[in-house]
Each structure stands twice: as C-alpha cells, then as structure tokens.
Image (spheres, rainbow, N blue to C red):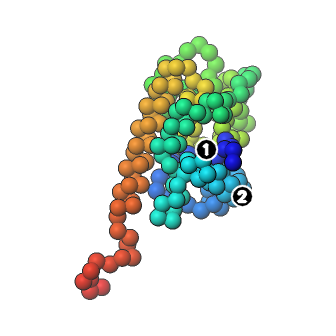
Amino acid sequence: MILKPQDILVLLKLVAQGDRAWSYNRLAVKLGMSPSEVHGAIKRAIAANLAVVLDRQIQPNLRNLEEFLIHGIRYAFAPDRGEMTRGMPTAHAAPPLSEKIVPDQEPPPVWPDPEGTVRGMLFSPLYRSAPEASRNDPALYELLALVDGTRGGKARERNIAVKELTRRFNRYEKGTESKLKKPHPSRRAAGSSK
C-alpha cells in the first residue's frame, strides 16, 4: 500500500484536534474530503504504521509520524513551486514560523487559494483541500505550515520547523497518555453507593 498526501493531512487533523472523539464523516466534512477518502487514508496510515489502534480508538503513531515528517516527507511529497499567485501563506510565511524567521526580499510561499489575501510564489499544498481545512482550524494550519517548512524550507527553516513539530507532538502525546490513564466515567469505584 502506498501512502498518499491526504493520509498525512488526516493524521495532522487528528493531532490538531487532540483527544476529541471523531468520526469518518466529521473528519471528511472538516477536511473537505469524502468519508471514503478519510477511511482510505486511515487504512493506509495504519498499514504504514503511522497510526495505531489503542483501546479501540485510532490515533496517530506520533514517533513514526514525526520521523516521517522530519526525514521523509520532503522526498515523498515534494512541493511544486511556480508563478506568482494569490493565496494563503505557508512555511516560513505563516505562523508559527513567521514569528521566528525574519522575511527576506523574496515573495512569500503561498498555497493557491481564491480566498487568499497574500500574493506570493505558488507552493503546492500537501492536499488540495488543505487551504479550506486550514481556514477553519488554526491548529491544523500551523501544523501544515510547519510540515511545509520541512517539505520545502531552507536548512534554518527546516531546523526551526522540526523543533516546533517535536514540541507540539510531545504536548499531544502527554494529553493522550493522561486520557488513557483516566478511569472511564462509567466505571464506579468499588463500594460506591450511587
């Protein structure tokens, strides 16, 4: 089974939303995909060991996903670059990298987007619906911008993006670990009179 770019978009959405419950239909709506596309993405992610089933819940396999984003994504899903266009800033031109990197004189990288407000150099999104999904989810937008920093950034941009991705994945991992350790609310303590 071969990974597709939308598989990474789905996994990043799961990271962005934290430990909130999800369904294929809800993810599909939020990502501008069909439920069958989301189902296929999850299936491929599990086969590639980028997602796991824990306690009957599908979750990103954070360490493997992080390793892929740091070392493999720029080779597997290299961005197309092109002409000047209107779009949504990405990579070092979008938060959080834009807060850490001083812009140079070159036009910023942008995802082509008719609703975009910035004119810059075309930088293909990981998946066609990424701009729309990002408009509705700032956390997902930041993760995608960081991934674009690793996909097509210069060495300094990649290094900063890698550190920030690792920090965010560590925070997500701590949240899911504490959720798994909590007793389920339907289980009553022994001797409870209620």
Q: Residue at x 49, y 20 (%)?
A: 156
Name the foreground residue: 145 vs 47: 47
Which image quadrant for residue 85? top right
Q: Where does residue 40 sit, x and y in percent of width and height?
A: 68, 54
Eyeballing the image, is 53 above or below 7?
A: below
181 vs 165, left or right, is left
* Circle 2: residue type: Ser
- Residue 105: x and y in percent read 59, 13
Q: Position of residue 11 (x, y in %)?
A: 57, 48
Image: 185 above or below 29: below
Q: Is residue 105 left or right of residue 32?
A: left
Checking the image for residue 88, the label placed there is: none
Indicate the quadrant where residue 81 lies. Answer: top right
Pointer 1: what residue?
Answer: 8
Where does the C terminus fall, quadrant-wise? bottom left
**SS of the residue under disc 1:** helix
The type of residue carrying mark 1 is Ile
Give the number of callouts. 2
Look at the image and tell me whether residue 87 can be seen: no
> Mark 2 Cα within 10 Å, few/some/many (few <14, many 20+)?
few
Mark 2 lies on residue? 36
- The residue positioned 69% from the left and 59% from the top of the image is 35
How far across and how far down the image is residue 58, in percent?
54, 58
| Residue depicted at 74% across the width and 23% down the height | 82
Q: Secondary structure at mark 2?
A: helix
Q: Nearer the viewer, residue 163 or 68?
A: 68
Earlier in the chain: of badge 1 and badge 2, it is 1
